[in-house]
Image (cartoon, grey):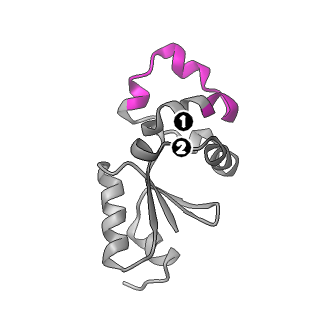
Amino acid sequence: MKLYGIANCNTVKKARTWLEQHCAEYQFHDFKKQGLEMELAQSWLQQIGWESLINRKSLTWRGLSAEQKQIIKDNTSALPLLLEKTSVIKRPLLEHDGKLLLIGFDDARYEKIFNFKS
């Protein structure tokens, strides 16, 4: 399993805490420190689309100009934004073998994914 996000994000912290408390093996990829590869962003866009991947409630999105927001109309136009401003991506993203399993954090969904019972 691989968890993508930003280390100081509260939701990412919750996910990491859950994973550690349940001794679940995972690798953490911090967008701020490690960036985002174009191929990975393209794969996510193909799997779920830009509308599900971009957090339009984020400070980063709200900080964009109206013109910048209007440019984002499809996966192709969203790609440069995702690569340049990784904090616009919803997080955390949980991935296994290249497949996105979950965006965000939810105890019940993590329990199901990792086969844990409450």
Horizontal side of 40 relative to 7 (left or right) equals right
- As displayed, is residue 12 above or below residue 72? below
Which amino acid lies under the numbered mark 2 shown in the image of this protein?
Answer: Leu
Query: Does 59 sit above or below residue 15?
Result: above
In percent of the image, x 67 and y 31: which residue is there? 74
Where residue 89 sits: x, y (%)?
A: 48, 42
Q: Is the magenta stretch mostly helix, strand or loop?
A: helix
> How far across and how far down the image is residue 68, in percent?
53, 18
Q: Residue at x 60, y 26 (%)?
A: 72
Q: Pick whichever of labels 1 and 2 is earlier in the sequence.
A: 2
Q: What element carries label 2?
A: loop
User: Residue 30 appears at what percent x and percent y?
Assistant: 42, 50
Residue at image location 42% in from the left, 77% down from the top = 24
Report the Cα–Cα distance between label 1 and label 2.
Answer: 8 Å
Whether 15 is drawn above or below 83: the answer is below
> Which range of residues does the magenta coloring cover?
60-79
Residue 81 position by quadrant = top right
Q: What count of labels does the image hold?
A: 2
Q: Which residue is located at x 38 percent, y 23 percent?
A: 63
Nearest the camera: 61 or 98? 98
Q: Around disc 1, counting alpha carbons within 10 Å, would you say few (fewer than 14), some (14 to 19), or many (20 or more)? A: many
Residue flagged by tag 1: what amino acid is it? Leu
Q: In which quarter of the image is the C terminus?
A: bottom left
Q: Residue 36 carries which label?
A: 2
Which numbered marker is on residue 82? 1
Q: Do the residues labelled 1 and 2 touch (CB within 8 Å)?
A: yes
**In x, y percent, where is residue 17?**
30, 67
